[in-house]
Image: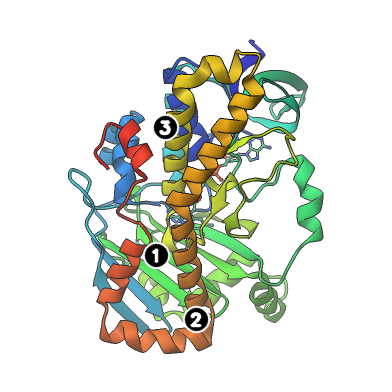
Amino acid sequence: MTTRFDAAIVGAGPAGAAAAILLARAGWSVALIERQAFPRRKVCGECIASSNLALLDALGIGARIDARAGADLRRVALMRGAETIVAALPAGIDPHRWGRAIGREHLDTWLADAAEEAGAVRWQPASLESIAGRAGDFVLTVRSLSGEGVGAELRAGLVVAAHGSWQPLPAERQAQRATRAPSDLFAFKANFRGAALAADLLPVLAFPGGYGGMVVADDGIATLAGCIRDDRLQALRGAEPGGRAGDVFEAMLRRECRGVASALDGAAREGAWLASGPLRPGIRLGRRRVDEGGVFRIGNAAGEAHPIVGEGISMALQSAFIVAALLGPERAQLVGSASATAAQRRALAAYEAIWRRRFTRRLRVAAAFAHVAMRPALARVAWPLARRWPGVLTVGARLGDKTRCAPEAARLAGQTA
Ligand SMILES: Cc1cc2nc3c(=O)[nH]c(=O)nc-3n(C[C@H](O)[C@H](O)[C@H](O)COP(=O)(O)OP(=O)(O)OC[C@H]3O[C@@H](n4cnc5c(N)ncnc54)[C@H](O)[C@@H]3O)c2cc1C
């Protein structure tokens, strides 16, 4: 197998696979490194905002999404305690006016397959262990996770980090363990068959110490996903010794949120509860430790919005398109020339400036919603307002950029922004 590439992309979630497709189409030789075998389920609410469906068309999987995903999501509901408030979701631009939901076992598999079809070489299941070298000539150590787990060295002119945010790279693990905090969020997701949930409704759940969401995705299967602070989770587990974290989370939701109890009454869970974390939403750009030279971070590896707004897949896809729009045409300068380091440094600065311009507001809006949902004192103030003017939910969704695609991404996808 070739072991020298123009670009190595670490992680084949929506960010990494999209970048792999776009760079391979632009004539780059691409290695796509993914530690998990696909298809795999993943903790996620699985809603794709309308503004991204055109990007998925451009990546070549639009028809499959259209055929398989859940119904158009036209309404949002806020569920807290015994109450539910419903409002319209803002419409996007034709032909994709409404968001849809699709299981990550499908979305991620289709995208990674499309990357391979575009010419990317998949290293999967294989884990990136370390990055050394410098821009123009990075050396990556990759450990195969099938069979004997043999290690291999791979060289790449440029590295795109798309490894998400919940599994730090080996060099960062120690630091993450050392900084556990009560406010760390742990995330859970399960699927249910036979849930009593309207197909066009996107309920957002608020409860002390956390938030979540429900939706009907492909094949009529409902996804229930949410985040809970570590201190609240520990308190719940303390009250139910021996209980599995996912079951404790589900029991709390059924107890504390009538909307969840009604939706799941008579429904059957399919598969186990999945868990991940800790989550620490925020911006991760500019961290150089791993590479000492510059790595292009996209998706959650660049920055993570509180998932209450369900914008993570959007930011993953859109940041991949932005990186590809900037890097794609410049392959000769970025990886083949004597001045690759300087060229990459300039491109990285340009990319990170665009990233901040396009996504910082989403992170702030998401953080504001998350804190209102999680903190009873704030929720008590905000709730009467939402009850009286449900339209604030529609405005909130618009403020969270649910209908707006980064123009750089839209242009590369052949759309008008
Ligand atoms: C509870 C919850 C609900 C959510 N709901 C929604 C929603 O409804 N809509 C939405 O848009 N977003 C939602 N999100 C956010 C969304 O799931 C993420 O933002 C999105 O998955 C980020 O995509 P990514 O490609 O950046 O990273 P990921 O999807 O995390 O992919 C990263 C990949 O990198 C791989 N990897 C990691 N380390 C290595 C390594 N060392 N070597 C090789 N591979 C590696 C991983 O296995 C993984 O496949 C939700 C998140 C949570 C927690």
> Which part of the image, by quadrant, shows the C terminus?
top left
Question: Which of disc 3 and disc 1 is earlier in sequence?
Answer: 3
Q: Quadrant of the N terminus?
A: top right
**Residue that carries the numbered disc 1 in the rendered image:** 267
Nearer the observer: mark 1 or 3; the answer is 3
Labels 2, 3: front one:
3
Residue 49 is situated, as x and y percent measured from the top left of the image, at: 34, 51
Residue drawn at x 54%, y 73% as measured from the top left: 210
Decide which of 356, 58 is in the foreground and name it.
356
- Provide residue 373's location: percent of width, then percent of height: 48, 76
**As shown in the figure, which amino acid type bears the numbered disc 1?**
Ala
> Is label 1 within 8 A of ligand 1 (CB to nearest ligand atom)?
no
Q: Nearer the viewer, residue 151 or 8?
A: 8
Label 3 Cα neighbours within 10 Å, binned few <14 / some 14-19 / many ≥20: many
- What is the three-letter code of the residue carrying label 3? Trp
Residue 147, compared with residue 71, is above or below; it is above
Residue depicted at 38% across the width and 77% down the height: 79
Residue 255 shows which numbered tag?
Answer: 2
Identify which residue, 38 or 163, lies in the foreground: 163
**Extreme left residue here?**
94
Give the vertical position of 157 relative to 366 (above or below): above
On screen, residue 134 above or below 29: below
| Kind of residue at disc 2 | Arg
Give left or right: position of 101 versus 37: left
Q: Are marks 1 and 3 in contact (CB under 8 Å)?
A: no
The reply to whether the C-beta atoms of the residues labelled 2 and 3 are less than 8 Å apart is no
Q: Which mark is residue 110?
A: 3
Q: Is residue 174 left or right of residue 3?
A: right
C-alpha span from label 1 to label 3? 28 Å
User: Would you call the spot at circle 2 few (<14 residues within 10 Å), some (14-19), or many (20 or more)?
Assistant: few
Name the mark nearer the viewer: 2 or 1. 2
First in sequence, mark 2 or 3: give its number: 3
